[in-house]
Image: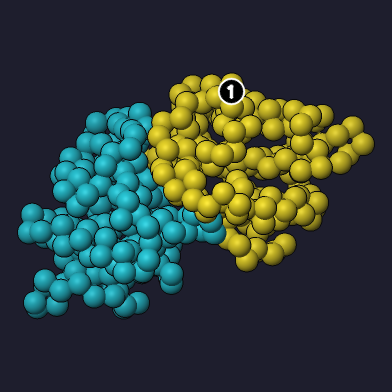
Chain colours: A cyan, B yellow
Amino acid sequence: MEIRDALPDDWPRIYPFFAAIVDGGATYAYPADHTLESARSLWMDEPPGSTVVATSEDGQILGSAKMGPNRPGRGSHIATASFMVDPAHQGRGVGAALGAYAVSWARAQGYVGMQFNAVVETNVVAVRLWQRLGFTIMTTIPEAFDHRTRGLVGLHVMYQKF
Amino acid sequence: MEIRDALPDDWPRIYPFFAAIVDGGATYAYPADHTLESARSLWMDEPPGSTVVATSEDGQILGSAKMGPNRPGRGSHIATASFMVDPAHQGRGVGAALGAYAVSWARAQGYVGMQFNAVVETNVVAVRLWQRLGFTIMTTIPEAFDHRTRGLVGLHVMYQKF
């Protein structure tokens, strides 16, 4: 597995699993009416942010992550990040590799911590992964996410100081 | 005092205190390089959000608030809001009136709660006001705000279920 900067031409290969994950309704609060073009700016970050892809040896895109400042201006010293692994390639460490990459990237860029604003509490695989990477659940906003099959569930705010 | 929807022509009268408050560096993480035009879309919300102004009997704008969904898609049932009171008109209940208005608006729109994502912990007047309006400090992200005079201070996540 290799992790590299996402190129504009990668987006049409990312969007199918972005769409599948958003439409799955279990992990992300993105607009429901996304299209290939409308969703591009939601995922393909501009500097100071960055979007990367994890690729297999034969060049397949296995997953993607975006990272950058959590807030502009006087909040821009704390990073945030988002992750999507193609469901067809789950279970082989892509999320863990992207998570470790994002933390390393943010440290190298001089951020003093990383905050996840909205981790769905029922996404226990992700929650445990972030905990292993050093993140703590700071609070849970109850019923803040309308899960497609489980109804209203909480959103964790997770944080790690570097 | 009256609270009414903000009109496009109100923006040039809001921007001077928006700019003074952002540049004051004590309460908001907005981009530092704002201009009259670049900041317009940061404050003048489109539906489903709303921006209002509080006006005096002689038509002066005393303060402004914006409110709407805290997240898109599956998080859009929780509201958020932001408030700015012209420093020249502080201490006469403008913030309290705008806060009460925002909560009433969100209830009437059918939101099930309201979340503030980044209340600067040293902004104790605001923190106490939101607590009186029913909000609870859910957590504090340490050192997440670079206060102009106090250095790194925490950002509260505050929440109220309706």
Position above or below: A43 against B96: below
User: Which residue is the site of mark 1?
Assistant: B133
Q: Chain of mark 1?
A: B
Which residue is found at the position 81% from the left and 42% from the top? B88
Which residue is found at the position 40% from the left and 34% from the top? B139
Image-based side of B74 in relation to B111, left or right: left
> Can you say which quadrant of the picture contains the N terminus of chain B?
top right
Image-based side of B67 in relation to A141, left or right: right
Position above or below: B150 against B132: below
Q: Quadrant of residue B35?
A: bottom right
Is residue A35 visible in the rendered image? The answer is: no
Mark 1 lies on a secondary structure that is loop
Q: Position of residue A28 (x, y in %)?
A: 32, 47
The residue type indicated by label 1 comes to: Leu
Q: Quadrant of residue B15?
A: bottom right
Q: Quadrant of residue A105?
A: bottom left
Q: Position of residue A127 (x, y in %)?
A: 21, 43
Is residue B66 visible in the rendered image? The answer is: yes
Image-based side of B66 in relation to A79, left or right: right
Q: Position of residue A151 (x, y in %)?
A: 29, 30
How many marks overall? 1
Farthest right residue in view: B58
Which residue is found at the position 25% from the left and 65% from the top? A104
Which residue is found at the position 76% from the left and 43% from the top? B86
